[in-house]
Image (cartoon, rainbow, N blue to C red):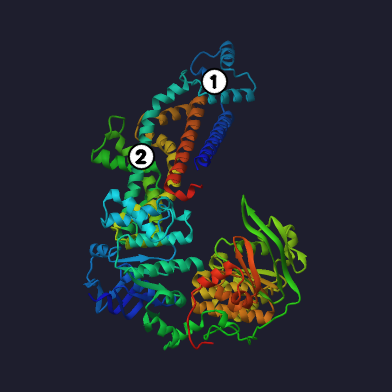
């Protein structure tokens, strides 16, 4: 059994590497195709003479064939070297490393909050015990899922910060500043996950094994948590993998709305300033997060459902 | 101490969007300590609802009224949920049909059994594992400690059902309610489970057995109640009820059971199929061979599921294929249907090679060979109407304007009305669905129909109607049948010759009367011995 599982894990890792390579290449081609000249970007506001231009081309190796530059980029990427930022003239890894923590904290907070909310909503509204609450909840979920996050953020800001003054309007000062952006990102996740979870719980509650469990004299809460919710987790875990993968992108926008430091600011500056190495690094990082999160989701599925573990 | 279960004038009504549905309409029921009472009836008779009412699990929208409803001397009519929790598992335990879905597939069977011990605080935490092993041993599960750590899907059907029974026995209940406890099982396994229940009965447990199968309950029940449409139509000691049934419905149920003695007669009295006189099929001597299989072998990895199987089916002949789950009979059916390539051996259909050829070459003859499966619902496109389902199988040469007429004619032949034309499969009853499947199969006038357990999902009276229909069509069209079933009675009723399979091999074959009357192979004997037989006197 262990050997079979090891092979499965190795296959997952190999697939992840392929995904990363495709993402890095696609980003490279996209940046290459974008209008504008790299040398212009590198010169910035500095003096523009033919000598300086030639020096820059020589220093960055821009006169080499495109294929060679691409292979060089891949080679360095494989060794963890993300290159140097054109605009900041610093190693990209350093730039991203400084800004990664706030974004990561925001994403993790949002993911945790979203999952907790979804579990609570599903547990309370599943089945036919509280039909009115169920209808209210599923309506709200639909609203949350179909509203763009930045709009949710703006509404929360105007009510809770400007009018009631409960939370700071902008910035990164302490945990209180984290609340609103995290809630903003968590609400659509909670809405979508709650719908999938409740559907799964409903379906499990109709199964004969739930009837058998009730016939054992278990409390309804135990039946729900131990027998129904666990079955509902399977589709939810797959969906959560995808949702968390997109969190990084969502965080970049929400950071702008709430004026928080983080990858959002870095990415915006890099894209508008044609800072190729930074843009490439952000794309590759997003892909890596996506691969890691989804591999983790697959492993969680294996833990939840023994039938997936082939012996 | 009186009766363990005492029910008088029980009514169970469900509030549905379509209005009130009375599932149980005034029944009386008693079960004495150490007694086994059986409730027999078909789907919708109210037998399962009655069983669930006794553990307070009839459902949220069920309204329960009774002039008396007592369990172990306690009136349970005003029980609140927490009172019911003390009853469930401890006073009355419930065992359902298929342990694959009645045990939580995500939990080990040991955890399921331990759950009862924990929720009723029966033994201390560190003694639970030992008690689980003891319980599994009690229901004769070999290697109990190892099995306790396995999941339901890792156990065979028989072991699973035993584990489920062990979980029900864990709370040391006075009453075990078993709702169709052997329906999903092979005959030999069924016999073992029934023996196990009889053993517990002898040890002092009371049993309430719910079944659609009179033959099964006859093995263990002291008394039988026959239910229909929410009422008890007849009740009495098992012997008396089987030997001298008083109510016409009980007689009808007994007549509907296919067996050796039912050969050549109609099973159903309320048949709705197009009347075709049924010739008494004593000995048909088929001359032309429709299909011949030689040396069929199929392997999956190192495991050989079918080994050197050969047979021939003559024109208009019915070949029965019997065997238990895993015997390879469904694999043979799929090879014959041209849906699976054998690793060795050949099939010849209508004097044409049928195996080892590309699908394109098979296509012209495809329509001559049709398949009817156990569960027609999953073989129909759920979005199609009955008309579409049947019309798809009509000859493409038939003009568009005539197709509906042809479908109506086919529906009529299988005893259905044209008002079903635009219904969807889901809106049909089990019997109607199987009739539609038959109509679809006979649409191209095939020379052979492969029937894979076509009646095993049906109630006994519906099964009787479908078997009558197949017999009628066979007599009218001269269609040959390859009839696969785990039910020896059904095969004995319908088939001319029979093939007995075990572990992928044919262990015995011959005319059905010879094989079933003078079985030569041990396995055939075991199968026949396990068959729950109805002891009915003075019946043809």
Residue beneath disc 1: A40
Mark 2, residues whose alpha carbon is within 10 Å: few (<14), some, or many (≥20)? many
Which quarter shows the N terminus of chain B?
bottom left
**Residue B421 placed where, x, y %?**
57, 75
Provide residue B398's location: percent of width, then percent of height: 71, 74
Q: Tag 1's secondary structure? A: helix
Q: How many marks?
A: 2
Quarter of the image for residue B331 reads bottom right
Callout in the foreground (2, 1):
2
Q: Is residue A285 above or below residue A298?
A: above
Q: Which residue is mark 2?
A: A110
View extreme (top): residue = A51
Relative to B149, residue A270 above or below: above
Badge 2: chain ID: A
Mark 2 and mark 1: Cα distance apart in space: 39 Å
Where is residue A126? Give x, y as percent.
34, 57
Q: Is residue B229 visible?
A: no
Camera sees residue A178: yes
In the picture, residue B176 is in which quadrant? bottom left
The residue closer to the viewer here, B107 or B237, is B237
In the image: residue A302, left or right of residue B455: left
Q: Secondary structure at mark 2?
A: helix
In which quadrant is the C terminus of chain B drawn? bottom right
Which residue sits at x=33%, y=80%? Answer: B25
State the residue at coordinates (29%, 73%). B33
**Disc 2 with disc 1 on a shared chain:** yes
The front one of A172 and B230 is B230
The residue lying toward the viewer, choosing from A67 and A52, is A67
Earlier-in-chain disc, 2 versus 1:
1
The residue located at (46%, 35%) in the rendering is A289
Q: Disc 1 sits on a residue from what chain? A: A
């Amino acid at each position: 059994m262990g050997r079979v599982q090891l092979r499965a894990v190795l296959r997952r890792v190999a697939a992840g590497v392929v995904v990363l390579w495709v993402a890095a290449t696609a980003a490279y081609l996209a940046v290459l195709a974008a209008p504008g000249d790299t040398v212009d970007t590198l010169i910035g506001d500095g003096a523009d003479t033919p000598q300086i231009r030639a020096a820059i081309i020589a220093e960055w190796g821009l006169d080499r064939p495109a294929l060679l530059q691409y292979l060089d980029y891949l080679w360095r990427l494989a060794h963890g070297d993300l290159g140097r930022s054109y605009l900041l003239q610093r190693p990209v890894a350093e730039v991203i490393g400084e800004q990664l923590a706030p974004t990561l904290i925001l994403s993790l907070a949002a993911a945790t909050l979203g999952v907790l909310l979804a579990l609570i909503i599903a547990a309370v509204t599943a089945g036919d015990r509280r039909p009115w609450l169920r209808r209210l909840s599923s309506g709200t979920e639909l609203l949350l899922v179909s509203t763009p996050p930045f709009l949710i953020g703006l509404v929360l800001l105007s009510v809770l910060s400007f009018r009631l003054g409960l939370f700071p309007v902008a910035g990164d000062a302490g945990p209180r500043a984290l609340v609103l952006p995290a809630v903003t990102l968590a609400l659509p996740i909670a809405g979508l996950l709650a719908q999938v979870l409740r559907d799964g719980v409903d379906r499990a509650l109709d199964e004969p094994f739930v009837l058998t469990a009730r016939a054992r004299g278990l409390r309804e809460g135990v039946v729900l948590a131990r027998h129904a919710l666990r079955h509902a987790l399977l589709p939810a875990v797959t969906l959560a993998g995808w949702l968390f993968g997109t969190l990084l992108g969502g965080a970049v926008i929400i950071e702008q709305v709430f004026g928080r430091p983080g990858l959002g600011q870095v990415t915006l500056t890099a894209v508008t300033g044609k800072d190729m190495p930074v843009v490439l690094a952000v794309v590759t990082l997003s892909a890596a997060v996506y691969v890691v999160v989804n591999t983790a989701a697959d492993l969680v599925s294996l833990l939840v459902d023994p039938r997936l573990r082939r012996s | 101490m009186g009766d363990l279960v005492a029910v008088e004038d029980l009514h169970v009504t469900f509030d549905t969007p379509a209005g009130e549905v009375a599932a149980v309409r005034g029944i009386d029921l008693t079960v004495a300590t150490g007694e086994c009472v059986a409730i027999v009836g078909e789907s919708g008779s109210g037998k399962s609802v009655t069983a669930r009412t006794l553990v307070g699990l009839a459902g949220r929208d069920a309204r329960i009224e009774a002039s008396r409803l007592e369990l172990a001397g306690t009136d349970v009519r005003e029980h609140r949920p927490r009172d019911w929790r003390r009853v469930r598992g401890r006073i009355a335990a419930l065992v359902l049909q298929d342990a694959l879905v009645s045990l939580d597939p995500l939990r080990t069977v040991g955890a399921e059994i331990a759950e009862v011990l924990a929720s009723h605080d029966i033994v201390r935490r560190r003694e639970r594992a030992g008690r689980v092993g003891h319980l599994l041993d009690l229901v004769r599960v070999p290697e109990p400690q190892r099995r306790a750590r396995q999941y339901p899907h890792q156990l065979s059907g028989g072991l699973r059902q035993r584990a489920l029974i062990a979980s029900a026995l864990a709370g040391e209940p006075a009453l075990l309610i078993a709702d169709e406890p052997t329906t999903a099982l092979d005959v030999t396994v069924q016999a073992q489970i029934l023996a196990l229940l009889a053993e517990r009965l002898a040890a002092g447990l009371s049993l309430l057995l719910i079944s659609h199968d009179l033959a099964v309950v006859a093995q263990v029940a002291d008394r039988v109640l026959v239910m229909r449409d929410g009422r008890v139509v007849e009740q009495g000691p098992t012997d008396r009820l089987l030997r001298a049934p008083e109510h016409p419905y009980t007689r009808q149920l007994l007549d509907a059971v296919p067996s050796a003695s039912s050969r050549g007669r109609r099973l159903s009295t309320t048949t709705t199929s197009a009347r075709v006189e049924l010739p008494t099929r004593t000995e048909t001597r088929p001359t032309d061979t429709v299909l011949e299989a030689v040396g069929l072998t199929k392997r999956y990895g190192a495991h050989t599921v079918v080994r050197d199987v050969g047979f021939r089916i003559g024109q208009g002949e019915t070949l029965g294929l019997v065997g238990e789950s895993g015997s390879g009979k469904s694999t043979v059916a799929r090879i014959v249907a041209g849906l699976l390539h054998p690793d060795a051996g050949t099939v010849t259909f209508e004097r044409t090679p049928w195996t080892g050829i590309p699908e394109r070459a098979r296509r012209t003859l495809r329509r001559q060979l049709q398949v009817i499966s156990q569960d027609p619902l999953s073989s129909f496109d759920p979005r199609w109407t009955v008309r579409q389902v049947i019309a798809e199988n009509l000859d493409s040469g038939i003009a568009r304007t005539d197709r509906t007429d042809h479908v109506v004619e086919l529906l009529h032949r299988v005893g259905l009305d044209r008002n079903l034309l635009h219904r969807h499969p889901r809106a049909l009853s089990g019997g109607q669905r199987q009739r539609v499947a038959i109509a679809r199969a006979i649409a191209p006038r095939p020379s052979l129909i492969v029937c894979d357990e076509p009646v095993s999902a049906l109630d006994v009276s519906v099964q009787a109607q479908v078997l009558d229909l197949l017999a009628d069509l066979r007599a009218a069209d001269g269609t040959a049948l390859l009839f696969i079933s785990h039910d020896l009675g059904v095969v004995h009723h319908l088939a001319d010759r029979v093939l007995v399979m075990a572990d992928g091999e044919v262990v015995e074959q011959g005319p059905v009367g010879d094989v079933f009357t003078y079985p030569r192979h041990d396995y055939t004997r075991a199968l026949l011995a396990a068959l729950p037989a109805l002891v009915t006197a003075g019946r043809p």
